[in-house]
Image (spheres, rainbow, N blue to C red):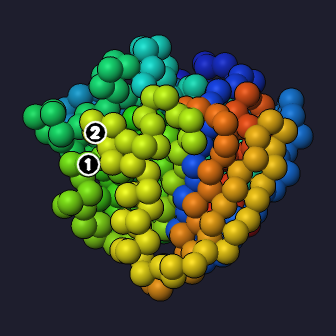
Amino acid sequence: MASVKSSTNTPRLAVRGLAGGLLLVALACGPLKQRSPSPRGRPDLPALQRVTMQSSGVERSFFLAVPNTLPPGPRPLVIVAHGGASEGDSKGRAMAIPWIDHADEGILYAFPNSAYDSVRPWFGPEDDTPLKDVRFLADIVARVGRKHPVDPDQVYLGGFSAGAGLAWWVYCNDASRYAGFGMVSAQMAKMLMPTCEPAAERPVFYMHGADDPVIPMSGNADHDASDATVAWLRERYACAAVPKRDRISGSSGTAVGATYTCKGPGAVSAWTLRDTGHCWPSVRGRCAGLDGSGLMLDFWRASAGLPE
């Protein structure tokens, strides 16, 4: 059995921002909607608990956010993987910031810390055991479930930048464990797409920046253009050729969307947030003034069984 120790002596969620901008793509059974976030500066935000555990013979850690009041019965668990960062064993804490306004909605949140540095923050194909982080995330689900009533059919995985790369890796190798996915600021890697065969078709929410200088939408040495990822998803989900057009305005940006109806699990909705870069959109930061976390949650509510 994994040895586990946890601590609640960590600061409450701080209010900071993440900068940049994105394209949003979702596979759903309906169009996305932008909800109003919870009031800012809430005094009842849950504390982040830093939890350590053994996974694949290595001590790993993650931050856990538990609502101060959990509704009765099994609850959904949302795991969100951070991007490249160099803050040691506290990288997951920063990833919690865009989720502040949704901390009191009856959802358990886990924000894992990577074991590598900012250059290669997650275990990947170069590692001698490529699926080590895939197992780490599965171990987090089991660890949280031993203490809290996690619904195994309502586990969701999101990721930003390099964390989105990890989420794509999990999507291709362990999809059936999760009810839905959300990738921000990273399209599927070139090496994954030719052999990606998810064990189960799951809704996927994909966001990427129109002017992203870190992982450009036009692609780089490791990634094809974002259009290739969208086309791959549309083909796999047998989506219609003509989309429904939508627009969402934030305080400092506008998202223009195209929603496709699809066979199987749902639809594909692709949104471009113009004139911004590499970020997770947030009403609290400088990234378009859009609640990206709320969009992702609403997508999962519409398409992947997340309760209201």
Residue 225 appears left or right of 189: right
What percent of the width, then of the height, locates residue 154? 53, 64
Query: In the displayed structure, would residue 246 be above or below residue 297?
Result: below
Residue at the extreme left of the image, as rendered: 128
Q: Amino acid at mark 1?
A: Lys
Q: Nearer the viewer, residue 224 or 177?
A: 224
Callout 1: 10 Å neighbours few (<14), some, many (20+)?
some
Query: In the displayed structure, would residue 55 be above or below residue 262?
Result: above
Asked if the residue at tag 1 contacts the one at tag 2, i.e. Cβ–Cβ closer than 8 Å, the answer is: yes
- Residue 132, quarter of picture: top left
Q: Is residue 291 visible?
A: yes
Residue 190: which numbered mark, if any? 1
Residue matched to label 2: 222
Residue drawn 33% across the image and 48% down it: 224
Q: Is residue 64 visible?
A: no
What percent of the width, then of the height, locates residue 271? 62, 56
Residue at the extreme right of the image, as rendered: 39
